[in-house]
């Protein structure tokens, strides 16, 4: 097995094109498990850790955050929790401190496991994945189109993930995960919700309850329509419950060692209801802060 | 006088070394040794139709490939049946390498030796084994049905069927004539002990000396030695077995000889080179041992006060593909099931069944968690039926202190009568009642309910046979430096023996615990031992150390008396602070190390110290064998019975069915406590493992006999985040059976955990929990089923 260590992004793209048998490795927290379990024996590893740009995040002029593919979870939590609260919350539930120091969103996307914790947030917030190849240059893939199936994604064989583009939060965001244990677990199912207060829109994402992360479109539309945007009124529990039901209806879970399909569906309805309720409460309290500021 | 060290919560002497990373585990040894890897069966049940090694032969670094055909003499025979039993009518043990048939995924078929492990695995990957599938038997239901057979010549898949009664009448009659009756069907799923370090073997053959040195990560070096010598047809004196630091055993490493413990030494002898094999995690899952899986049918008859008049228990025990360790686990379940309770007529019948899965051998608790589950579920069911307090039902059935020693009328796993030596169970229950807050719990429940939270309380008790024979021994020697070396054949896997055995020796010899070095698991140092399992080490070895040390103390007094002269008699002396001194006149004294010098009369001096022992100087005692040392053995007459009670408060999420432990309390009685800190640590570790068994860990096979969660990704070991703070209270009822009054403590924590957690969930939810472990998903399904039943009733 060869170990390729490109020093620049351009070299990495060339190597990717020249060595279709190479597997890119960032934090290695998925790749090394696969090698260790002998699930694959690639001809080469393409180490991306010498490319500084992949470990940086920047802000575009329009405010969009350009998150380098290998920025580790620990830094997302520390540095981006205000701009990207949903992603930071999801990052906090990944593995253990060691895993969060090494793993990042690029690897989560590359692995495209249905249980990846960042996926629900990425689809709920309309993130865009920027991939690039030496031959065809940059391509922007909306998160909703990125996942094709269990561990399959929309990248071509010669492409690498460069960055993930995310808009700073336009309102409260929440993430919730049910695991089989309190830490270091693969999600039984997970759920993200993001409110866009100005546009009065609701984004949502379901994880680990279908071959790919899913957006529960009906639930999103229902909530956008039903939330009492005009007032600071408490959320009618019936709205939250209905939202939860629609979330559950959008999932296509299976039975496995971690839980039954029925349990996953039920848990999704609970998470949908709870996260929407939390998000709304947060919205209420931030509104009240704002209005009290305006008053003084 | 020194303060006695026994009873003090000393910090463990071994920890600084282990914490600094200076431990020496099996894989730290044998640099440069050849590495072994195994081709293991990918199917649960099949005939082997061919083994093709052609593609493997040109891998550079390949040294040897062995199949069953290559094995000579006794190595080609099945592995020994370690514990025969008259009821084990159809014992089957595995071959070192499969002989024409495989009976579980993971069974070793081909052994590869190469210059390193990577290459050995490359070779293994290129070996093509062809199989003709046979129908697999997976799970107890299929085994019981008996339509498919694991072993053609074991009809109904039955390895053993065994019945015991307690001689207090016919159980079925007692149940039939009782005022009230109940029946319960219970299930415990398969699990495994999962030591952090798997198994491993390193062998070195010295052809000139014709000696074989084997290092193995085992719980019994002396028995491995005898087994290896027998299989390899070597005189036992030519075989040394050494146990390095062992990263956990929990029972799985008491099994021996593992195929690898025979094959690796044989390969080393055959090749004339050191060979090493270190088990990887997947191998540990599919080719070591599991435990726990049982189905139970309980019938009980009782009176108005909840007293058990008759109890009948049928057990179906999944023993996996082979029974090298005999039927110890179901024997323990069926005998220890009674716990601290006296029942009228008791009848227990177990059927031990073959399945095409990994073998089942004792795992910490060794059948007791299942027995306690049966008994405590029964207690709760009776309370529910009679509308009685659950604790009151238990109190009504307790053996009273004045009834000790109490004969349960059964034969225990050591073949001896099951007689409880001592215990005070009413006090034990009172203590747990207070500790867990039983009496105030309804108020707590109401307060939680007011916040929309759902909590429940559970309680349970157990009795554990510990410290069984046949024996352990120790050699105690005082060096001329004053260091005391205690050698025991017993192994250690983290139980703190280096400290607790040192405390015992130090007390007898009047030295500090720092002066004592304990050596374990090295047959070069001590040849006769049984092993560390069944909570027996401190009872058997502890007493043996005390006996050997006492002999040394006596010898020291005799030598010192002669040296002090002046009419001093040995009886006038005592050993204190590293000196042998006159009780009446402490200034008349001699250093223990000087006594050690004098104990070895010398012709030649080699330093100032030893001058004192030479012919023209010494006043040495005559008639003594040289050396201030002695060997002692302790052979218990029968087991000692430790006991405990656990109480737990759980919270269940009304929506997600998440189960959280809010409070975990333990009352624990293991007789005289040598080191309370170590005992507490053992209890904590046991409870953590018990919580794993109750809520997280399980081994899952699919219908084809594939182990679907064979990694730590889905075999969920509890973390610090799952283990609650554990409150412990000790009580001491000394055992009258051994000089130190000890009982064992190693397994205690794990025994009643599933039972008490089930009890608490039942209490929180108001539904019957009949199967453990339980996950949120399963609790949700139970709720749904109850809801469906309710709707049916109302419709
Ligand atoms: C103990 C443990 C616990 C874990 N817990 C969780 C958890 O709770 N939640 C969760 O979601 N995941 C978890 N994981 C999985 C893993 O940590 C995450 O998926 C992580 O995001 C992977 O990131 P990485 O940088 O380590 O990826 P790597 O392992 O380096 O790569 C993962 C995949 O992405 C590809 N890849 C990486 N970077 C690029 C790139 N720039 N361009 C193209 N392809 C790329 C690789 O080729 C590979 O296929 C856990 C893993 C372990 C070992």
Image (cartoon, rainbow, N blue to C red):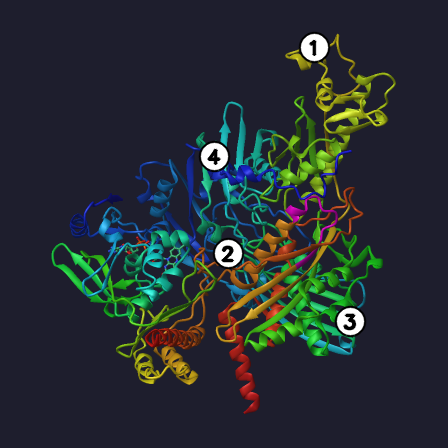
Circles 3 and 2: CB distance less than 8 Å?
no
The Cα–Cα distance between marks 1 and 2, rounded to whole angstroms, is 61 Å
Residue at the spot of label 2: B719
Helix, strand or loop at disc 3?
loop
Q: Earlier in the sequence, mark 4 or mark 1?
A: 4
Q: Are marks 1 and 3 on the same chain?
A: yes
Which chain does the residue under circle 4 lie in?
A: B
Image disc number at residue B307: 3
Helix, strand or loop at disc 4?
loop
Nearer the observer, B487 or B128: B487
Q: Is residue B63 left or right of residue A109?
A: right
Helix, strand or loop at disc 1?
loop
- Quadrant placement of the N terminus of chain B: top right
Residue at the spot of label 1: B603
Q: Are marks 2 and 4 on the same chain?
A: yes
Is the residue B49 above or below the residue B594 in the image?
A: below
Q: Are marks 4 and 3 on the same chain?
A: yes
**What stretch of residues is rendered in magenta?**
B666-679
Q: Position of residue B519 (x, y in %)?
A: 62, 34
């Amino acid at each position: 097995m060869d170990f390729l260590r490109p020093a620049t992004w351009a070299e990495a793209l060339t190597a990717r094109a020249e060595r279709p048998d190479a597997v890119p490795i960032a934090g290695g927290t998925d790749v090394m498990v696969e090698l260790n379990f002998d699930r694959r024996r690639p001809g080469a590893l393409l180490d991306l850790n010498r490319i500084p740009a992949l470990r940086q995040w920047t802000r575009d002029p329009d405010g969009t955050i350009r998150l380098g593919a290998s920025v580790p979870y620990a830094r997302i939590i520390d540095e981006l929790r205000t701009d990207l609260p949903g992603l930071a919350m999801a990052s906090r539930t990944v593995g253990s401190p060691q895993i969060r120091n090494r793993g990042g969103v690029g690897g989560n996307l590359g692995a495209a496991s249905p249980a990846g914790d960042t996926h629900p947030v990425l689809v709920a917030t309309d993130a865009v994945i920027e991939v690039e190849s030496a031959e065809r240059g940059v391509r922007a893939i909306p998160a909703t189109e990125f996942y094709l199936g269990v561990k399959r994604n929309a990248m071509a064989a010669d492409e690498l993930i460069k960055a993930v583009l995310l808009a700073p939060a336009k309102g409260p965001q929440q993430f919730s995960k049910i695991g089989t244990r309190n830490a270091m677990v693969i999600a039984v199912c997970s759920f993200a919700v993001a409110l866009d207060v100005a546009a009065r829109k609701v984004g949502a994402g379901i994880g680990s309850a279908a071959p790919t992360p899913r957006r529960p479109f009906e639930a999103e539309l229902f909530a956008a329509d039903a939330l009492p945007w005009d007032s600071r009124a408490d959320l009618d529990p019936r709205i939250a419950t209905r939202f939860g039901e629609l979330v559950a209806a959008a999932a296509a879970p299976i039975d496995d060692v971690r839980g039954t399909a029925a349990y996953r569906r039920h848990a999704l309805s609970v998470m949908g209801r709870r996260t929407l309720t939390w998000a709304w409460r947060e919205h209420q309290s931030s509104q009240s802060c704002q209005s009290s500021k305006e008053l003084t | 006088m020194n303060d006695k060290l026994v009873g003090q919560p000393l910090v463990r002497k071994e920890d600084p070394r282990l914490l600094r990373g200076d431990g020496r585990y099996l894989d730290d040894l044998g640099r440069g040794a050849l590495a072994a890897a195994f081709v293991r069966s990918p199917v649960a049940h099949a005939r082997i139709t061919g083994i093709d090694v052609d593609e493997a032969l040109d891998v550079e670094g390949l040294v040897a490939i062995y199949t069953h055909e290559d094995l000579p003499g006794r190595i080609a025979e099945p592995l020994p049946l370690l514990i025969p039993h008259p009821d084990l009518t159809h014992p089957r043990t595995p071959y070192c390498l499969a002989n024409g048939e495989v009976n579980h995924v993971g069974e070793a078929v081909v052994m590869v030796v190469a210059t390193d492990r990577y290459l050995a695995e490359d070779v293994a990957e290129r070996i093509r084994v062809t199989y003709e599938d046979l129908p697999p038997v997976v799970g107890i239901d299929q085994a019981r049905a008996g339509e498919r057979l694991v072993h053609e010549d074991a009809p109904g898949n039955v390895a053993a069927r065994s019945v015991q009664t307690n001689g207090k009448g016919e159980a079925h009659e007692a149940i039939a004539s009782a005022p009230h009756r109940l029946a319960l069907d219970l299930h415990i799923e398969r699990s495994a002990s999962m030591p952090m370090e798997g198994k491993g073997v390193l062998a070195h053959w010295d052809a000139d000396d014709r000696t074989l040195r084997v290092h193995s990560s085992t719980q019994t070096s002396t028995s491995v030695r005898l087994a290896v010598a027998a299989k390899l047809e070597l005189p036992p004196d030519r075989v040394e077995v050494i146990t390095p630091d062992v990263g956990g055993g929990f029972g799985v490493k008491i099994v021996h000889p593992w195929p690898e413990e025979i094959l690796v030494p044989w390969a080393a002898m055959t090749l004339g080179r050191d060979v090493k094999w270190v088990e990887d995690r997947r191998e540990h899952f599919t080719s070591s041992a599991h435990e726990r899986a049982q189905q139970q049918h309980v019938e009980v008859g009782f009176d108005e006060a909840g007293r058990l008049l008759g109890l009948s228990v049928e057990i179906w025990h999944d023993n996996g593909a082979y029974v090298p360790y005999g039927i110890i686990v179901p024997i323990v379940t069926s005998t220890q099931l009674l716990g601290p309770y006296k029942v009228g007529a008791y009848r227990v019948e177990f059927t031990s069944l073959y399945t095409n899965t990994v073998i089942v051998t004792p795992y910490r608790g060794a059948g007791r968690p299942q027995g306690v589950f049966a008994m405590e579920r029964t207690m709760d069911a009776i309370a529910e039926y009679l509308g009685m307090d659950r604790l009151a039902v238990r109190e009504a059935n307790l053996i009273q202190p004045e009834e000790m020693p109490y004969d349960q009328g059964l034969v225990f796993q050591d073949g001896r009568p099951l007689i409880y030596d001592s215990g005070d169970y009413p006090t034990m229950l009172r203590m747990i009642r207070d500790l867990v807050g039983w009496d105030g719990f309804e108020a707590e429940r109401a307060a939680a309910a007011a916040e929309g939270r759902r909590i429940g309380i559970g309680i349970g008790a157990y009795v554990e046979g510990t410290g069984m024979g046949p024996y352990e021994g120790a050699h105690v020697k005082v060096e001329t430096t004053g260091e005391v070396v205690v050698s025991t054949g017993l192994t250690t896997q983290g139980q703190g023996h280096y400290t607790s055995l040192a405390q015992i020796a130090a007390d007898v010899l009047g030295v500090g615990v720092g002066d004592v070095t304990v050596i374990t698991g090295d047959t070069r140092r001590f040849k006769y031992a049984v092993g560390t399992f069944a909570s027996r080490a401190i009872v058997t070895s502890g007493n043996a150390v005390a006996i050997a040390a006492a002999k040394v103390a006596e010898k020291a007094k005799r030598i010192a008396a002669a040296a002090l002269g002046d009419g001093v008699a040995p009886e006038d002396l005592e050993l204190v602070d590293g000196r042998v001194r006159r009780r009446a006149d402490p200034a008349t004294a001699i250093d223990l190390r000087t006594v050690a010098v004098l104990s070895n009369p010398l012709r030649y001096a080699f330093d100032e110290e030893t001058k004192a022992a030479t012919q023209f100087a010494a006043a040495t005692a005559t008639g003594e064998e040289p050396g201030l040392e002695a060997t002692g053995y302790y052979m218990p007459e029968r087991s000692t019975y430790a006991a405990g009670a656990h109480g737990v408060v759980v919270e269940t999420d009304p929506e997600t069915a998440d189960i959280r432990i809010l409070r975990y309390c333990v009352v624990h009685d293991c007789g005289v406590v040598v080191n309370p800190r170590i005992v507490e640590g053992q209890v904590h570790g046991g409870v953590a493992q018990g919580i794993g068994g109750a809520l997280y860990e399980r081994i899952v096979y699919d219908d084809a006999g594939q182990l679907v969660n064979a990694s730590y990704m889905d075999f969920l070991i509890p973390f610090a985040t799952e283990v609650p703070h554990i409150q412990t209270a000790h009580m001491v009822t000394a055992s009258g059976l051994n000089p130190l009054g000890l009982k064992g403590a190693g397994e205690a924590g794990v025994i009643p955990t599933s039972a008490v957690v089930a009890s608490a969930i039942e209490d929180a939810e108001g539904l019957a929990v009949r199967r453990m472990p339980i996950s949120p998903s399963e609790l949700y399904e139970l709720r749904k089923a109850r809801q469906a039943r309710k709707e049916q009733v109302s419709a």
